[in-house]
Image (cartoon, rainbow, N blue to C red):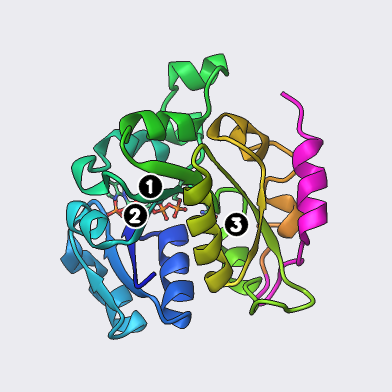
Amino acid sequence: MTTLGLIGSGNIGGTLARLAVAAGIDVVLSNSRGPETLADLVAELGERARAATPAEAAAAGDIVVVTVPLKAYRQVPVEPLVGKVVIDTNNYYPGRDGEIGELEAGGVTSSELLQRHLPRSRVVKAFNNIFFKHLATLARPAGAADRTALPIAGDDTEAKKAAAELINALGYDTVDIGALADSWRTQPDTPVYGTPYGAAEPFFEHEGAPVDAATIRKLVDSAER
Ligand SMILES: NC(=O)c1ccc[n+]([C@@H]2O[C@H](COP(=O)([O-])OP(=O)(O)OC[C@H]3O[C@@H](n4cnc5c(N)ncnc54)[C@H](OP(=O)(O)O)[C@@H]3O)[C@@H](O)[C@H]2O)c1
């Protein structure tokens, strides 16, 4: 993979961009306010980074990450993502996103909503269960004894393989937890959400607890509806 597209360049998008550039991957960043508002981040990231509109970032990415407040998911451009692997980091917080009836009813996951919005893309859920600061501090090279694992979910096996390769390059092992319908197991308030990697507050630099794949599997399996 040569280029990662980012729709959303905030806490998670910015962190993923830094990890990608460190791994030698080009990034195209985007947000809601326009490329010029990303000038500082682009300058920090250097020549592997540029900013664009969401549609341009979607078109440029070999893999594209959607990392926006969930309430904005219907604004994600559809056509430029056709046929692509789309990584979904999003979580549903009704206080921020407003109540979404289908999610309140519990019969569907937020990633399935994104997949419905992008019917010809291949959505993979990842990065949603780790605090962005831990995402930065826990990345390790492949084979490191203290490498951390992240759960992934998706309906397309090849897409999950491609996402896992990217995540490996960014510094993490992966645990395949099944289909998008299974991704409720990593949503907010489940055992694998956030806390296994450390407390969000207070946060100390370089903090974070490595969590191996077997532990992630156990935590995911212990989730209850
Ligand atoms: N923060 C975490 O530690 C964490 C961890 C795991 C998962 N998540 C989830 O990941 C998602 C992103 O979280 P975050 O903390 O990175 O959020 P954030 O810091 O608020 O950043 C959100 C980004 O999305 C952009 N955006 C908003 N609406 C958009 C639109 N219609 N089109 C394109 N870009 C748009 C924002 O751009 P503007 O600033 O220009 O509006 C901003 O760059 C959320 O669903 C969150 O629940 C967060």
Q: Please, is residue 2 above or below residue 114 in the view?
A: below
Q: Please, is residue 32 above or below residue 96 in the view?
A: below
Quadrant of the image containing the C terminus = top right
User: What amino acid type should be assigned to the residue bearing mark 2?
Assistant: Gly
Q: Which mark is residue 131?
A: 3
Residue drawn at x 50%, y 22% as measured from the top left: 103
User: What amino acid type should be assigned to the residue bearing mark 1?
Assistant: Val
Residue drawn at x 77%, y 47% as measured from the top left: 217
Residue 202, how many percent across, how many down?
A: 69, 62
Task: Please tell me whether residue 194 belongs to the stretch shown in magenta.
Answer: no
Q: Which mark is residue 8?
A: 2
Q: Please, is residue 220 above or below residue 51 in the view?
A: above
Q: Cβ of disc 3 within 8 Å of ligand 1? A: yes
Extreme-bottom residue of the structure: 47
Q: Which quadrant holds residue 153? A: top right
Q: Is residue 201 visible?
A: no
Residue 92, how many percent across, how many down?
A: 50, 34
Q: Which residues are magenta?
A: 204-225
| Mark 2 burial class by Cα count in 10 Å: few <14, some 14-19, many 20+ | many
Q: Please, is residue 219 above or below residue 65 in the view?
A: above
User: What amino acid type should be assigned to the residue bearing mark 3?
Assistant: Phe
Q: Earlier in the sequence, mark 2 or mark 3?
A: 2
Q: Is residue 60 visible?
A: yes
State the residue position of label 1: 68
Q: Which quadrant holds residue 28? A: bottom left
Local SS, label 1? loop
Extreme-front residue of the structure: 158
Q: Cβ of disc 2 within 8 Å of ligand 1? A: yes
Q: Are marks 2 and 1 in contact (CB under 8 Å)?
A: yes
Q: Earlier in the sequence, mark 1 or mark 3?
A: 1
Q: Which residue is at the front of the view, 133 or 174?
A: 174
